[in-house]
Amino acid sequence: MSSDGKIRAEALAERLRKGDPLALGQALTVVENGGSNALALTEALAGAFGKARIVGFTGPPGAGKSTLLDALIHEWRREGRPVAVLAVDPVSPISGGAVLGDRTRMGAHSLDDGVFIRSVSARGHLGGLCEAAHDMADIMDAAGWPLILIETVGAGQSETEIAQVADLSVVIAAPGLGDELQAIKAGILEIGDLLVVNKGDRDDAGETAQHLEAMLSLRSGAKRDVSVLRVSATTGSGVSRLKDEIDHRLEAAGVAAGADRKRKRNARKMALAIHRVASRISAGIPDEDIGAMKPEELDHVIERWLASLPTGVED
Amino acid sequence: MMAYPERVLVTKIGFDGHDRGSRVVAAFLRDAGMEVIYTPPWQEIEAVVKLAMQEDVDLIGVSSLATDHLIMPDLIAALRDAGMDHVRLIVGGIIPQNEQPELLNAGVSAIFSPGATSEEIVETVRELVVEARAARECAEEM
Amino acid sequence: MPKIASNTDSASLKEKQAKWQIRYDREIGRDRTVVNRSGVEVRPLYTPLDWSDGRYDEDLGMPGELPYTRGIYNTMHRGRTWTQRQLIGLGTPQDYNKRVRMLLQQGASAISLLPCNSGFRGIDCDESPVPLLGTCGTVINTVDHMDSALDGVPIGEISTAMNDPTPFTLFAFLLSVAKRRGVPFDKITGTANQSDYISHFVANHMFYRLSQPGARRVFVDHVKFCREHVPNWNPVSVVGQHMQQAGATPAETMGLTLSTAIQYADDCIEAGMSPDKILPRFTYFFDISISFFEEVAKFRAGRRIWAKITRERYGAKDPRSWRFKFHGQTSGVDLTQQQPLNNIARVTAQAIAGIFGGLQSMHTDGFDEAMTCPTEDAARIAVATQNILREEAHLCDVIDPLGGSYYVEALTNEMEEKILQVMDVIENAGGMYNAADAGIVQRMIGKSAFEYQSRIESGAEKVVGVNCYQSEAEDGEVETYRPNREAMEAQVAAFKAFKADRKQADVERALDELARAASGTQNVYEKVVTAADSGVTHGEIIACLRRELGFGHPLMVA
């Protein structure tokens, strides 16, 4: 990569570290779109990652995620704590474009400097949506935001993956969603640390909560400390209890959380690199990106990938 | 940087609440493959600037009925103060003919009145986004 | 004795029609499929096979009785013409007063007051940029403003419509003025237009003042207060206009509006009011589009459905509860900026549809109304249009003149079906409040708006002067209304002085009471009324309620 690109990345990284709000918006765009600029920026910011805590929120449409998030943000802001949000909106399957409207539900914070909201469309990201989201969260981390919320519309596979990016995963359901509840079962339930039944003031909310608890008890696999909570984002009931629960769990995970995330992330990157090499070799499952590259280019990319991975936990 | 979709903010400032037009335009832009950040009406100028910054938009489309366009210059000034003068601006809606030149002079790139087709709007937005990104790169180099 | 053809020989008719169809198909070549805005297919010919008056009793009946299809009153417009209620709002209270007096002189029989957009947003004139004040409505922030606006207007004799959403501060100001003038509350007649908060949230107009649950609370308190203290005031106006203007089809609009009415009735009944106590004071506000027959059918079907709902769902016994009373406004969405004088023809067609649809009161748009607050001339022509239709075209002489038309009756039935389908969707979603919360309504409306715009772009839907019959020559540049800058600045200055001079202790006490009522269970609206009496301003009342009941945000984006 050109030294020009490197210098620009350094400049941007510097502005970011200084807290320039314009820089964060621009840096997010750079890493979202990958490529050599993104790599350069990540390199320039090495050492600034790992302080933030990431909480993922997912659930079917209509469950009231954005409204709940808005209520939670209010709670954190009451304590003077800054919050950054990555709101992932679904993409139009036809055009690849998207109307990113999630943040409108968080409009109360539009003038608050302690809240930063970025909308991401679930489009074809180079390297996958999950990677892009993680990279963007890392940038928010490097810019000094201690708490990062990632919101996705649940049900799809990439949304499940994003939940794995987080230190803590919250799945939001609501009564009366019928078939949507089946969709929750499909995969998201597997990764939820907290299951929240929103619209808890409705008569059938109790039933939904019981249903979720029943599903939990039937789940096979490693035992996890999963809680089911009832809230009402609109009346505020249960919201501060939820916030406390989130804070408590984040604290319990401790410093290890950041490093743990990094380890998982590196492992994933490694696995991805290996997969690409393997698929290039095996040619049975062509990977378009790899397919277009010359072998020596591919070697170079893999080498750089491997070189960018930190060797130890202390990084 | 590699090519990535246009990022456009569609919003309403001032006091009008009729947003059918802006919603429909947002949908057309989406169908043209763009990423559209959409806000409801009655946005404060300061909020729009913050949003544009956080979302790193290339272009802001303001929907205006009656007199809201009269405060466009305030938005333009605020964007400039925030270091965002590469962001291109378009206005759509009902703007009296005799007030349009002033708007264009103040820094609005294009004005769309009823009768403008979605094709025209999409085309114009694409061109303006290219301009915006080039302008931003120039600014960075300085 | 006229022949009632209720036993038409249908076999013979079928044969005749089949033969005609052959001739028709041969001559017309490729026929186009015509579908109206609501998605009902419109055929070239309707005969007794589509609807015959064997169904008269079931479908129509007489005006003034069930099923009310032909009209809610026995005499309808022949007995009493529709109320000419022109919506006005502009500039300062003095500007409003001048305009309203002119219109009353020219035959308007009731008045309507539209406040400035700054008011809709919930702020006072000293918190707005001055160029945005008074451009689309009148600035009214205090009782004094209301008093000036209605100077010389006999509020105890004339029906007024306050276009003011929760928390209905304008109505509170009106009541204070009534007290000042010694007009007893039972003489105050009119309607709380814009009381329909759900339509604001789904059509994104005026959601801004209070959160949805907060608006729900104040709405119910307001209805309770009015039923008790202002018995001849209609506290509920369910506004179909918002949905249709935002893009809902006419059938969707009627379905969503009736579902909203059901939600409000349910909420009021839950709060302890009985059906017959509230339903007679439910009114509706609709847009009248230029899809002529579709609008007529929409209104007739709506009347029929509402009569059924009030009786079957609510068990209402009072016939006044069964009556679907509505105000129609010619739709500004159909008007164009190109060749603006053409809009006079549009408004005329829309007005006729409204009259044939059996409305109780009507506003006709000025030809420039899509672009600006109407000028005096445009406003005058709008009122003259109604007068001409009545006096010269004699549209008031016959009740429901389109009744019995094979097309209109078949269409009314088909619209009814579509309307009921929409109502089912809402019912399954748990009612209108929940459906709006879940974004179902907004998505429905957004989809229709998008489809309509696509049809205009493709040319499938024609708009004269826009995508056909365009003309370079614009017949006259439309004058844009701008309030007098000095007068407005003087108003703001006077307002500031008023705030400085009034009794702070009274204001604080009133706001304190208001806040306490809001955070408790007392009737909030009672305290809004006393706040108005104590010199509290519009913006102050709303700021107080926002703190207690929550800020408003639109619920969902398509």
Image (cartoon, coloured by chain):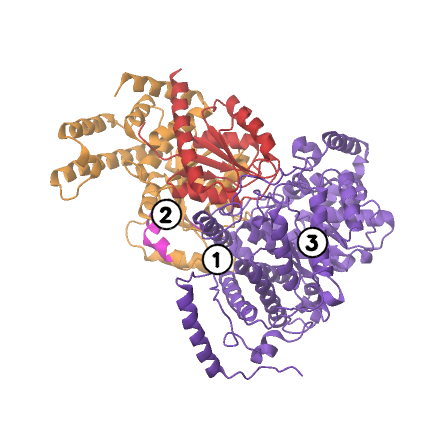
Q: Which chain is red?
A: B
Q: Which mark is residue C108?
A: none
Residues under numbered marks 3 and 2 in contact, where contact means CB atoms less than 8 Å apart:
no
Farthest residue toward the front? C27
Report crowding for label 2: few under 14, some 14 to 19, many 20 or more residues within 10 A (C-alpha).
Answer: many
The numbered dot on residue A205 is: 1
Q: Is residue C88 visible?
A: no
Above or below residue A63? Residue C227 is below
Q: Which residue is mark 3?
A: C385
The reply to whether the C-beta atoms of the residues labelled 1 and 3 are less than 8 Å apart is no
Q: Under tag 3, what secondary structure?
A: helix
Q: Quadrant of the N terminus of chain C?
A: bottom right
Q: Are marks 2 and 1 on the same chain?
A: yes
Q: Is residue A293 above or below residue C30?
A: above
Q: Amino acid at mark 1?
A: Ala
Q: Which mark is residue A192?
A: 2
- Which three-letter amino acid code belongs to the residue tagged 3? Thr
Asked whether A190 falls inside the magenta stretch, the response is yes
Q: Which chain is orange?
A: A
Q: Which residues are magenta?
A: A182-197
Indicate left or right for C412 with A2 as reference: right
